[in-house]
């Protein structure tokens, strides 16, 4: 007695039901998962529909504009004190123009903390809430989802910082003008400060997101970010020795001053060296996070 095995023949309906992910016109990329454009759109929707994200973005803008106004007022008070105090007059003569020029960007240290923490939360929350299962089920290769989220975070951080710094400059103008202090927002140095600080904050947000992916823990990622940008510079400054003095130059938080200085400051990196150092601080953790994201379980 023999048995016959019948092999099912695919019907025309099954062949045209969208089962071939690489078919032109279906909006899907080659291989598993949707196209990068769809992944990017999905990540942007997740980003802009979270109330906590909108609160942090609003807080960043408020901090930058508020500290810009406060710094402009403080600079004006300093200039007024310099009129009667010889010591203050000498100090203001040496730093007055730089203080006025730096008023719009005075809130950058706080903005980097907020947006860096946002980068941590956007990645770590994927794992703490279980959303990563849905995300990586839809995008099995994982890398497109990670890159899309990184692009959303970096571009948002850059645009928000640039717009907020410019608004801070507009708010600072009448305050400084009341003290007869000039501020030209169209000068090359003002534009340089705006662009470099915006890139710097975007880089911090990228580092924060990488920490969130590596640690998968919101508290641990934020504490690591704070330690890297706020604690280590103080520790390296307090510990005596040539090694720590030299190493302090290569901390990411100390690169922005070298990149924005009108002239090269002594005992600091050149602008191009500081840019390379900051780029390395971004590239290494981001690449490591992307590699480990594919190798580790959800």
Image (cartoon, rainbow, N blue to C red):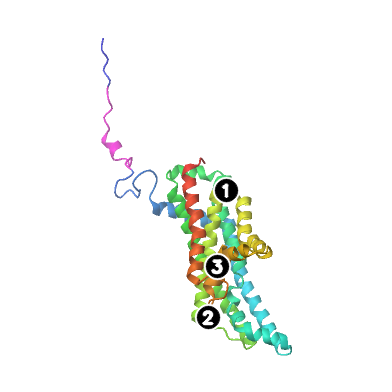
Q: Point out residue 156 in the picture as x, y percentages from the top left corner.
A: 50, 63
Q: Point out residue 129 in the picture as x, y percentages from the top left corner.
A: 57, 45
Which stretch is magenta?
A: 6-20
Q: Which residue occupies 51% across, 45% down?
A: 132
Name the element at disc 2: loop
Badge 2: few (under 14), some or many (20 or more) residues near its Cα, within 10 Å? Answer: some
Q: Point out residue 153 in the picture as x, y percentages from the top left corner.
A: 50, 59
For residue 159, say whether it is visible: no
Front one among 131 and 280: 280
Badge 1: few (under 14), some or many (20 or more) residues near its Cα, within 10 Å? Answer: some
Residue matched to label 2: 185
Q: Which residue occupies 47% across, 51% down?
A: 146
Q: Which mark is residue 215?
A: 1
Residue matched to label 3: 255
Q: Point out residue 50 in the picture as x, y percentages from the top left corner.
A: 56, 55
Front one among 295 and 15: 295
Q: Which residue occupies 53% across, 70% down?
A: 269
């Amino acid at each position: 007695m023999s048995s016959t095995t019948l092999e099912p023949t695919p019907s025309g309906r099954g062949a045209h039901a969208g089962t071939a992910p690489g078919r032109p016109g279906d909006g899907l990329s080659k291989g598993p998962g949707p196209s990068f454009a769809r992944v990017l759109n999905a990540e942007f929707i997740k980003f802009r529909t979270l109330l906590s994200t909108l609160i942090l973005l609003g807080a960043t803008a408020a901090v930058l504009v508020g500290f810009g106004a406060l710094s402009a007022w403080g600079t004006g008070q300093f200039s007024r004190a310099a009129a009667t105090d010889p010591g203050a007059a000498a100090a203001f003569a040496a730093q007055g123009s730089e203080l006025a020029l730096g008023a719009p960007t005075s809130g950058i240290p706080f903005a980097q903390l907020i947006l860096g923490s946002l980068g941590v939360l956007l990645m770590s929350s994927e794992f703490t809430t279980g959303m990563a299962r849905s995300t990586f089920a839809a995008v099995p290769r994982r890398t497109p989802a990670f890159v899309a989220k990184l692009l959303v975070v970096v571009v948002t951080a850059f645009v928000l910082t640039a717009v907020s710094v410019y608004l801070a400059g507009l708010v600072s103008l009448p305050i400084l003008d009341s003290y007869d202090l000039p501020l030209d927002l169209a000068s090359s140095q003002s534009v340089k400060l705006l662009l470099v600080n915006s890139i710097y904050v975007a880089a911090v947000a990228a580092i924060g997101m990488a920490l969130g992916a590596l640690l998968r823990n919101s508290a641990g990622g934020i504490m690591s970010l704070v330690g890297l940008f706020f604690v280590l510079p103080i520790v390296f400054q307090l510990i005596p020795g040539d090694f720590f003095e030299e190493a302090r130059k290569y901390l990411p938080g100390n690169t922005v001053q070298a990149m924005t200085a009108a002239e090269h400051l002594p005992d600091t990196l050149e602008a191009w060296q500081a840019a390379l150092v900051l780029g390395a601080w971004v590239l290494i953790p981001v690449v490591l996070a992307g590699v480990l994201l594919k190798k580790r379980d959800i």
